[in-house]
Image (tube, rainbow, N blue to C red):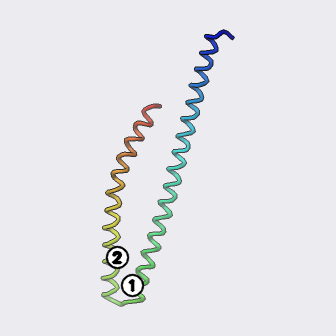
Amino acid sequence: MPGRHLIAVTALLVYFNTGTREKGVFKDLEMQIELHKMRADEQRERVHEIDNKMLQKFKNRSCGEVTEILNERWTTQCIYNENISNKRWKKNDRWLQHYKKRLYSHL
């Protein structure tokens, strides 16, 4: 094969290999996203179980108005901590959205 054709064939192979690699990276990224979604669902279930256990402990160790006050304080503190966490993740989400735009703009 003449040299100029060999160069063209080599360039095409590099191009197709790059495309294949990009597809693989996107598939891997999609898989990672799905895993994170599954973990998030598991964590939601875990948090719900913890809340139920805490309410049960409040009921076992107190009664009436004291149980309600303890449960209210528990809920208030959880919401406060969740808001702090959400503020932190908003910063991460902005970065991820920017990264996503840059990543998909090359396609």
Asked if residue 106 lies left or right of residue 9, the reply is: left
Q: Please report the residue visible at 37 percent of the width from the left and 41 percent of the height from the top.
A: 98
Residue 100 image-quadrant placement: top left
Secondary structure type for disc 1: helix
> Looking at the picture, does residue 3 appear above or below residue 88?
above
Locate residue 93, reporting x and y percent: 37, 49
| Distance in Å between CA atoms under marks 1 and 2 | 10 Å
Secondary structure type for disc 2: helix
Residue 104 image-quadrant placement: top left
Asked if residue 13 lies left or right of residue 61, the reply is: right
Q: Are marks 1 and 2 in contact (CB under 8 Å)?
A: yes
Q: Quadrant of the N terminus?
A: top right
Q: Please report the residue visible at 47 percent of the width from the left and 73 percent of the height from the top.
A: 49
Q: Please report the residue visible at 55 percent of the width from the left and 36 percent of the height from the top.
A: 23
Task: Please name the amino acid that badge 2 sits on.
Answer: Trp
Q: Which residue is mark 2?
A: 74
Mark 1, other Cα within 10 Å: few <14 / some 14–19 / many ≥20? some
Locate residue 59, reporting x and y percent: 40, 86
Q: Which residue is mark 1?
A: 58
Task: Please name the amino acid that badge 1 sits on.
Answer: Phe
Mark 2, other Cα within 10 Å: few <14 / some 14–19 / many ≥20? some
Asked if residue 58 lies left or right of residue 31, the reply is: left
Locate residue 7, reporting x and y percent: 60, 15
Q: Of all residues shown, which one is farthest toward the right? A: 1
Disc ID at residue 36: none
> Looking at the picture, does residue 101 appear above or below residue 37?
above
> Looking at the picture, does residue 63 appear above or below residue 12?
below
Between residues 11 and 52, which one lies in front from this camera angle? 11
Question: Sequence order check: which comes first, mark 1 or mark 2?
Answer: 1
Locate residue 19, reporting x and y percent: 56, 30
Asked if residue 49 lies left or right of residue 71, the reply is: right
